[in-house]
Image (cartoon, rainbow, N blue to C red):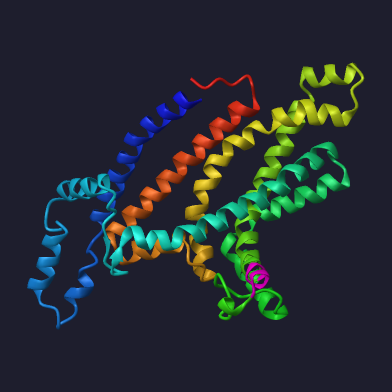
Amino acid sequence: MAAYVFRRVLIAVPLLLAMTLVAFIFIQMAPGDWFDTLRLNPQISQDTIARYEALYHLDQPVLVQYFYWLGNLARGDLGFSFEHKSPVASVIRSRVGNTLILAVVSIVVAWGFSIPLGILSAVRKNKLTDRVLQVIAFIGMSIPNFFFCLLLLYAASVTGVLPLGGIRSVAFDSLSLGGKVGDAARHLVIPTLVLSTASFAGLMRVMRGTLLDVLKAPYALAARAKGLPEWKVLGRHAVPNAINPLITIFGFEFSGLLSGAAITEIILNWPGLGSLMLSAVRSQDLYLVMGSMVMGGLLLVLGNLIADCLLAWIDPRIQLR
């Protein structure tokens, strides 16, 4: 396992380099840059802007700029955010925890409901329970995240049960420990529901379809012929084999939440990486965009590596080489 992980890390390095190079070139192909906003200010001289561009090597060709940025990255320096007037590492550090909390909670909720309900839907195939769950799954896959978010915000504004956005209340610091936990949990409800709904619907359908195929497999029929009760056939034979495709999806689910959460974070005023990256792209904050891209690439590599290791741990037929 350790040797496999080491090889995957080595393979990930050129992939990340290629990703950052393509992203850097595409950003530079966009018309204008962040300093265009300074050029519109008559109080800032062109010589000052030229000195800033020379300081950050932005007056050099694109490939030269990229290698300067890559050299700084090798030393652990992600660059300077022009919009936030702060190092990129500190800007990302202030947001990454919020996004990871939202991503982990959303994944736990989506998987915690989709797997048992997918099993129930497969066991109760073509019965009322299965049809109701299928309708719920189709609705969850069809409704856009931003529209579902607006519906939940409207419901929250009418009922007053949940907060309308943000990560904590104004009086958060004056609350007790239990009050702080409860306040954070209440603020997590709406973004968690929005992000986990589409994922829950897709995972439940995958679990149902895969389990139905596994229940028809020869080893499941042989287990029934030996006299094993149905719950043992499900628990010992069917579910462990049916869950493999879901483990594969996990790697993409984890990294996909970074980009998928952007609109939700903006609507709910959630200070996370998704909204940060979108605002950085809009303002053409070059080094902040590149830092966010590096974070997204690392999450993708890490998620797929975890998924592959989990597959090898769950399914003894899979060998890591």
Q: Quadrant of residue 219?
A: top right
Q: Give residue 290's position: percent from left, percent from top.
A: 32, 53
Note whether 236 is above or below 46 in the view shown: above
Magenta span of residues: 176-182
Note whether 305 is above or below 203 in the view shown: above
Q: Residue at x 47, y 62 (%)?
A: 272
Q: Residue at x 36, y 48 (%)?
A: 294
Q: Give residue 283's position: percent from left, percent from top.
A: 31, 67
Q: Is 215 left, or right, of 1 in this rendering?
A: right
- Asked if residue 179 is among those painted magenta in the image, a careful observer would answer yes
Q: Give residue 247's position: percent from left, percent from top.
A: 61, 36
Query: Hey, which residue is sitting farthest left in the picture?
Result: 47
Query: Hey, which residue is sitting farthest front in the picture?
Result: 176
Q: Residue at x 23, y 64 (%)?
A: 33
Is the stretch drawn in magenta largely helix, strand or loop? Answer: helix
Note whether 76 is above or below 150 in the view shown: above
Frontmost residue, 185 versus 231: 185
